[in-house]
Amino acid sequence: MTSLTIGIWPPWALWIAATVALLFAAYRSVAPFVARLKPGQRNSRADGLDIVYDPSKNKTTINPQFEIVAVHGLGAHPEHTWECKSIDKAKPKVHHLRDLLPHAFQTARVLSFSYNSDWLVDAPEKTAQQIGHRLAERLAEHRGEALRLPIIFIGHSFGGIVIKQDTSGIIFLGTPHQGSSLPIAASLLGKLTALLGSNTALLLTLQSNHNQLSDLEDDFRRVAADKQITSFYETKPSFYLGLSIGCIFHRESARGYSKDPVSVDTDHAGLNKFNGPDHPGFREIKTVIDKLRAKPLIRQADDVLTDKHYTSERLMIKRLSGEELSMDQCYINLAIVEQVQAKMPSQDELEAKDSAPKSSPFSLLARLTVETLSDHSQVQLKDIFSKRKRSDGTEILPRRVLIRGRAGVCKKIVHEFVRGDMRRDLFDRVLWVPLRNLKERPAPGYNLERLFFDEFFRLQGHESGKLFATETSKGLKHNRTLFILEGWDGVRLPPQTLTCPVSYATSYSGSLTSSSPRGRCA
């Protein structure tokens, strides 16, 4: 008779057995995809900044008005991370950056930043700071001397950490601003695959309250005050090998500096994968981008005019004593005067009239002499373009008006438009052109775009200034631009100089032309 005696194993033996079992289970888990990840069996990954969509390269050749830069997460594939199975059988996959964003935002240039963020196999010796600097360098190379378009960053998971190193707005998709406890467990797996080239340095920086994350938060806080930031976080647990590992990053870690974080009914991987434009997650992101997106170029040009060109210093009026006169104390006394076409005087008569002695319009007597106008002829500045009746009873809607007045009239009109509410219902912008400036500019080939660049946008740089000038020129066709042409009678210019850039422009839009009280205008 044979007997089998089962003894009690010592603790150290149980520990060895458990360790062997764990190693075997880990090997069984990772062996299939480790084989695919070996350097000799992997396709080389893209690295750097790639343009996914550029509206200026399409048939429509639309100038991009802002850029969307997407950054993938830790251990993610730069292409597959943005893909999702399509509900349309004819198209097996939908790419977030290539298929959805260009259709939703046709004036956006979409770019993808790729980098090697592997940690399990063939991992690079890099930190988040190094990757962030690489992103900044690639963006600088891409933009060069071109117009610095506002950027909206979209960062998924660790990609958000990379972004926080440069920014119009930021969309964080499940970014662990305060870290997570999951990287500790994952780092154990990384230790088991050390021979395959794993490196857990990047991974361990994502553990809860890591020093690097805390330092980055401190640095980011100083520059994020004026940035528009929205964070998305998952509400469903993620699964690995059929086992739930919970939410990768909890709400408080994922919210960052977002005032109103957005919850999405998906797991961590689903935060950047959408099967079509009607997917709830994509609709949420589209709404946020609509809020973050930059103004159209014509609106940016209008802002330059209002904020940087028509400054208080430029619109300042000084008394003869040199004392500054507040615009609130300035007024314009306007009257409508109908003139009968008279016989044009000869050149000799005009020259004789010009050479005849005249009293100064700036004398004390002239400045104190204010004519009293009849009520029926007076008109308020804000009503100068309103419909009115002529003496013969016909109604007109004036769009080109000549004002004979003293110096400072044009500044007051510009001030009322920019700082007040003068006819914003009729005009989107005012272009004040002192005609004396045209004396120093060449006539051959001088067009509207060159005029606008010289007069309004030169200080914005060559590329940006040219774009703003072009957009302003294009905006004339909508008939919502008011030209103020100052000193028509004070310049002696060849006909072609005025005919091309100025007279042509006023045929599209409204115009106010100023002349001295005794000046003559052809």
Image (cartoon, grey):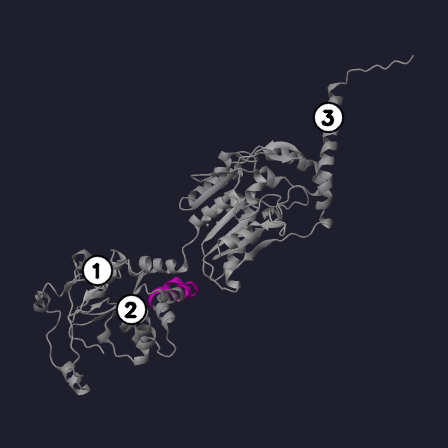
Q: Which residues are magenta?
A: 455-469
Q: Position of residue 90 (x, y in %)?
A: 63, 52
Quadrant where the C terminus lies? bottom left
The residue singled out by tag 3 in the image is 18
Of circles 2 and 3, the one toward us is 2
Q: Quadrant of the N terminus?
A: top right
**Predominant secondary structure in magenta?**
helix
Would you call the spot at circle 2 few (<14 residues within 10 Å), some (14-19), or many (20 or more)?
A: many
Asked whether residue 29 is drawn in magenta, I would say: no
Q: Quadrant of residue 111?
A: bottom right
Instruction: Give the number of the mark in front: 2 or 1.
Output: 1
Callout 1: 10 Å neighbours few (<14), some, many (20+)? some
> Going from the N terminus, do you reach mark 2 or mark 1 first?
1
Using the numbered discs, state the Cα–Cα distance from disc 1 to disc 3 in whole angstroms. 87 Å
Q: Which residue is mark 2?
A: 433
Contact between marks 1 and 3 (CB within 8 A): the answer is no
Q: Residue 456 in magenta?
A: yes
Q: Quadrant of residue 120?
A: top right
Q: CA distance from mark 2 to mark 3?
A: 85 Å
Q: Is residue 371 visible?
A: yes
Q: What is the number of the mark on residue 382?
A: 1
